């Protein structure tokens, strides 16, 4: 059973920066595609970024492109989300997720098999 644990969420001022981390355990991290999603109060959970198992491909939601960067360190079983120039509309609970198969590499949350508990990011104006 794969377990994911996010850390790094906090209150940050708009225009600042922060980095979220997600550590995986209980599975073969290097075989899993990873994604970051977020959910704001009263809204559906939405895709933010994803990275292929090898780290060789990334993809971003239009709303964060150019500001956020997803990366991974396979020996450390960790995926990161670097958030630069966050905006108040980025305020949400951020979740990392992973797929059980290398073949599932897309932005649909239904493709992800395991989820973390989330970490709160609040961006003040």
Image (cartoon, rainbow, N blue to C red):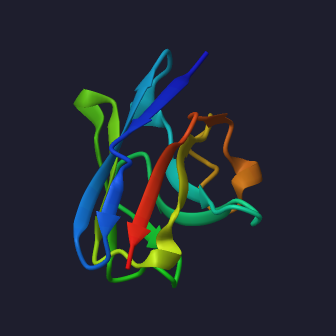
In the image, what residue occupies the spot 36% across and 48% down?
A: 54
Q: Quadrant of residue 124?
A: bottom left
**Can residue 100 be seen by looking at this rendering?**
yes
Q: Is residue 55 above or below residue 46?
A: above
**Can residue 51 be seen by looking at this rendering?**
no
Which percent across, then down, holds residue 82? 28, 60
Q: Quadrant of the C terminus?
A: bottom left
Which percent across, then down, holds residue 2? 56, 21
The number of numbered badges drawn on the structure is 0
In the image, what residue occupies the spot 28% across and 78% down?
A: 85
Q: Is residue 63 left or right of residue 12?
A: right
Q: In the current view of this chain or complex, which residue is farthest to the front?
A: 125
Q: Is residue 42 left or right of residue 35?
A: right
Q: Quadrant of residue 123?
A: bottom left
Residues 102 and 93: in front is 93
Q: Is residue 113 above or below residue 46?
A: above
Which percent across, then down, holds residue 78? 32, 36
Q: Quadrant of the N terminus?
A: top right
Residues 30 and 60: in front is 60
In the image, what residue occupies the spot 50% across and 38% down?
A: 32
In the image, what residue occupies the spot 53% across and 66% down?
A: 48
Q: Is residue 86 left or right of residue 27?
A: left
Which percent across, then down, holds residue 14? 32, 77
């Amino acid at each position: 059973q794969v377990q994911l644990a996010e850390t790094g969420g906090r209150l940050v001022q708009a225009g600042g920066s922060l980095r979220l981390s997600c550590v995986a355990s209980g599975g073969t991290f290097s075989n899993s595609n990873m994604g970051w999603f977020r959910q704001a109060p009263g809204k559906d959970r939405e895709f933010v970024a994803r990275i292929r198992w090898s780290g060789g491909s990334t993809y971003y939601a239009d709303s964060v492109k150019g500001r956020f960067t997803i990366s991974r360190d396979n020996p450390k079983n960790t995926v990161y989300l670097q958030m630069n120039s966050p905006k108040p509309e980025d305020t949400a609970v951020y979740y990392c997720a992973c797929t059980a198969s290398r073949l599932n590499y897309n932005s649909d949350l239904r493709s992800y098999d395991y989820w973390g508990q989330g970490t709160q990011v609040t961006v003040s104006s």
